[in-house]
Amino acid sequence: SQQGEEDPQALSIQEGENATMNCSYKTSINNLQWYRQNSGRGLVHLILIRSNEREKHSGRLRVTLDTSKKSSSLLITASRAADTASYFCATVPLTGANSKLTFGKGITLSVRP
Amino acid sequence: DGGITQSPKYLFRKEGQNVTLSCEQNLNHDAMYWYRQDPGQGLRLIYYSQIVNDFQKGDIAEGYSVSREKKESFPLTVTSAQKNPTAFYLCASTPGKPSNYEQYFGPGTRLTVT
């Protein structure tokens, strides 16, 4: 079962623009994580945000979490061609099976030079 | 270099054959995971292990088997009972539970069964 649902499914922007990707989930979470995957490669962890946090930054990345709306967003500022990849959100439930992540289907981001 | 290695990168098998995918980590992580990725499906959990000699089924364990005899190794066997084995397989590890830690992924093995 997939907990996180990303939106949009695909995004194409010009280099230098900002990219905003959204993730919604259904059940209460312990934390939410964002990952990046370049074509044919493994996933790379970007940011982990806990349920008691509202915003985190890492370089050009900004993640927000709204637990009342059960949603998160990932903002990439001043995008570069190298940001072209698939981006996934993943959640850890608050109770029960908190030994595993549940991934969404991902967002394909294309950054045009 | 510390990290997770998966071998081989590409694997081809005939239908009806069992095949074992390798996953090794030298990060001293306790927990290891196997995921399957199909186009448009995201990642789905096959099996995971939080400690040596113990493992649990994930969401799509049917047709797969694993072992965890050593902390650094978590091989996955795709058996002939798996109806659609062609996919991209990813191994991951964490120092502990995902409630506290992010996952570290290997480069993946693309399995094609004909």
Image: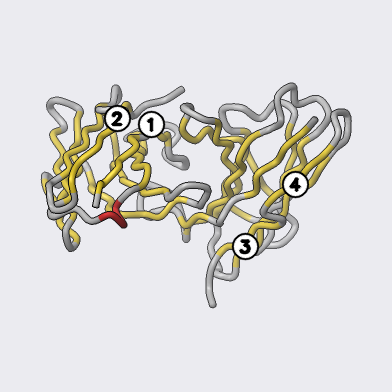
Callout 4–callout 2 Cβ contact below 8 Å: no
| Labels 3 and 1 within one chain | no
- Amino acid type, callout 2: Glu
Is label 3 on the same chain as label 4?
Answer: yes
Q: Chain of mark 4?
A: B
Query: What residue sits right under mark 2 in the picture?
Result: A6
Estimate the x, y position of residue B20 in percent, counting from the top left: 79, 46
Q: Nearer the viewer, residue B23 or B101?
A: B23
The amino acid type of the residue labelled 3 equals: Thr
Q: Say which residue label 4 marks.
A: B11
Q: Are marks 4 and 2 on the same chain?
A: no
Question: Could you tell me which secondary element the residue under label 2 belongs to?
Answer: strand
Kindly indicate whether the residue at mark 3 contacts the one at mark 2 (C-beta within 8 angstroms): no
Q: Secondary structure at mark 1?
A: loop
Task: Tell me which label, 1 or 2, sits earlier in the chain.
Answer: 2
Type of amino acid at the residue the image marks with label 4: Leu
